[in-house]
Image (spheres, rainbow, N blue to C red):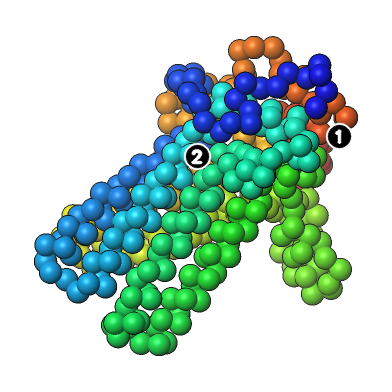
Amino acid sequence: MNDDEEEHPLAPQTFGVPRPVTNDYVTDLHLGAWLLLLSALIFVIVMCNIVAEAYIGGYATYVVNSDYATLASAVVFLLGTIAFLYVSYPEEFRAQVTWLSKTDPDTMTFDQKYLWGNSFVLMNWLFLIATLLLLVYPVYAYVDGDITALVFGIYILLFAVVLLLQIFWLVASFPHNMQKNGGNGSSMFLDAVCCCSSCHCEQSCKSITSDPLFWRTHLGSDFLVGAWLFLFLSVLLFAISLYEVYTDYTDYLVWLWFISSLFLLLGAALLVFCSYPINAYSRSVWCAITCQKEELFLHPDDAWEEENVYRGGERESLLSQQAIATRERNKRPKK
């Protein structure tokens, strides 16, 4: 980093006291973060009730221990949503994007690169720990003989898939990966699936659309791919909660779980929407809900979106990328 560059006061630390978000500065990312936090909080309440019932009712030991593990998973997931809520504040999001755009990954410490260099890394580590805790139930149930080897194998297979997806999202959120491709993030998934030399992969992608910009737009960064996968899992959980409501609509805990999964689905959808660079500071959803005129969030200080450039000329600011993306999109001929 050059001496004439100003180091942001919040970098490289992750936590501080973010400036309160007023009604004028609420972004869709911030709205989605609140929905995810409410979802996690309701699920913690549900698990507290289940643990209390299992403990008072004298359930089998493995059931009680499994419920405790699931409660712990819910609490850790709640902490992850708090980390996400923190970075969703426009002021803090700007601070971390600015730090990422100006900092050479080679100068980062180990914890900055792999542990909590930005709130997205911390969020994904907490989500990963929460996922690992969910493994307690099938292991306990199989050892106790409550489920067969086949059911246990299905549990492990599904768990392995979810775990791999979570690890992929975690790796994509590492600072040095988020800086790749001119600040748009790494594209390992896109390069492996749709841009490889395999004729089968190429034909599979072209069978959906012949527009090469389609895949670059919707799968262009691994973090965006991770957000899509998170949304897919949220849809599955919401479908399960719908089934539970259909089969046992008299249980209030089932309804709480349904509300929790609904908030999770809506929050995940907003996370996907805001993971597109052009929507990072979008307020369209919030303005539609509150009947306001949509205006892009701008920092009250200088025109940082024009000045926040990598001194080597290799990386432009996030808002500059949005302007370029919008300009290129408008240049494309309408069909």
Tag 2 residue: 84
Residue placed at 53% from the left, 64% from the top?
Answer: 163
Q: Which mark is residue 314?
A: 1
Task: Residue 261: give x, y in percent of width and height.
Answer: 37, 53
Above or below, 134 against 126 in this view is below
What amino acid is labelled 2 in the image? Phe
Which quarter of the image is occupied by the N terminus?
Answer: top right
Residue at image location 31% in from the left, 56% down from the top? 71
Q: Which mark is residue 228?
A: none
Amino acid type at mark 1:
Glu
- Residue at the spot 16% in from the left edge and 71% down from the top edge: 59
* Relative height, residue 309 to residue 188 (above, below): above
Label 1: state its secondary structure: loop
Q: Does any portion of residue 185 appear in the rendered image?
A: no
Quadrant in the picture for residue 212: bottom right
Measuring from the top left, give residue 213's x and y in whole percent: 78, 50
Question: Toward the viewer: 232 or 289?
Answer: 232
State the image quarter where residue 150 is shown.
bottom left
Quadrant hosting residue 196: bottom right
Q: Measuring from the top left, give residue 168's x and y in whole percent.
A: 63, 58
Q: Residue furthest top?
A: 301
Identify the secondary structure beneath mark 2: helix
Return the disc, 1 or 2, that comes first in the chain's sequence. 2
